[in-house]
Amino acid sequence: MLRRNFINTLPKLGLFSLWPVETVLNDEENLENSIKNDRKYWYRLLNKIAYPVFSNLAHETLVKNMPVEKSPTYDERKNVTYLEAVGRTAAGIAPWLSLPEDFTGEGLVRKKLKELFLQGITNGVNPHSPDFLNFEKEKQPIIDAGHLAQAFLRAPKALWEPLDNVTKSRVVNCFKMLRTRKPHKNNWLIFHALTECFLLSIGEVDWQKAKVESAIKKFEEWYVGDGWYSDGVKFSFNYYNSFAMHPMMIETLEILLANDLIAKERLEIAFQRMVRHAEQLERMISPVGTFPPIGRSITYRTGVFHALSMLSLREKLPKNIAPAQVRSALTLVKKNLLIKDVFDKNDWLKLGFKGTQPEVADYYTSTGSLYMTTLSFLPLGLPADNEFWTAESEAWTSKKAWNGQSFDKDFQVQY
């Protein structure tokens, strides 16, 4: 207790930067002992995932220290894995880092990760840094710049505004570099649109309106019904509706609406579609906390539940889904998937689904790709006293159904 009280006084004394971060992160309340407390378990697990990425980027050792494991069918995309790790981690952790500072154990971990991110981004867009991230070559940076823009949009006061003007200017220039490549005509369109909308959101006059409008129009054309977009002209049954399509469609439309560039009804329709999709995602979680390993990119693990997590963060879940049942379901999913075998000895994520299974990775998958799993941690952006965290555990839909309890019948919705 004395040790913990001393740690809690460090920020007040201005000594936090002198205290080894490992001491704060590896106190007696470690990950294993926190497993009965859902929020503590979530934030410690997120820290375990994010710390190697942010710490190494902050110390300009990301390229040096990050292992690059590749799919057996990898197409040798050059130097994209580092931006993947940074952008995807940032998008998932941003809401949590945006919470007000406090002197709790959680607050100290959050504060340190935020400091590491801010320093890391300064390095990542500095052309003289050994960790200068690749925005200029290959098509893949279109995706992960989109995730980085998503992080800035989700936590502008915590992650964008504190950056110095030189770094901000470099970020803007890096995003504009993407214009030399065309996105594929599928979910990639919305990543490109969101990056351009971020530029609009910070007052950049030079943003590409036509490309944004084209992406939105395509998505509206690709809506096939009952909460599902086609991922391009042909429908593919996978989790990309949740990984990217619904969340980024909403965030793009919100920026356009805030700038009086679309009618409110377009956003409302897109939001209703996302709610329906999230309702189906919740039903996909089995009574024992598993879900179908369908489609491509299953190595993104819990990122499958991005849309459900985003609606939980925004407190906009479907009326028939209680926050506690989402928390209970996702906690069990994390305990099933994000186990010891998915990490190497230095806590870097390894290729696979449940454990180490590089053979299930896709041709575009490498170590950095895996950090999409952080997108299921968005509810950490809710304060600790929110109902999502304080309500008693509750059975989710499939658990109720298979236990013979009363549950809501599913039905198709047309939007």
Image: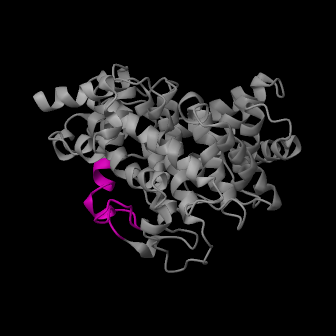
Q: How many labels does the image show?
A: 0
Magenta run includes residue 382: no
Q: In the rendered view, would you say 232 is above or below 359? A: above
Indicate the position of residue 98 as horizontal and vertical percent values: 49, 29
Judged left or right of residue 28, residue 280 is: right
- Residue at x 62% of width, y 73% of height: 78
Q: Relative to the observer, which residue lies in front, 297 or 17?
A: 17
Indicate the position of residue 93 as horizontal and vertical percent values: 46, 41
- Residue extending furthest left? 1
Image quadrant where one finds the N terminus: top left
Judged left or right of residue 177, residue 284 is: left
Q: In the rendered view, would you say 267 is above or below 302? A: above
- Residue at x 65% of width, y 51% of height: 145
- Residue at x 33% of width, y 62% of height: 342
Q: Give the range drawn in magenta.
A: 334-356
- Residue extending furthest bottom? 72
Image quadrant where one finds the C terminus: top right
Indicate the position of residue 154 as horizontal and vertical percent values: 57, 33
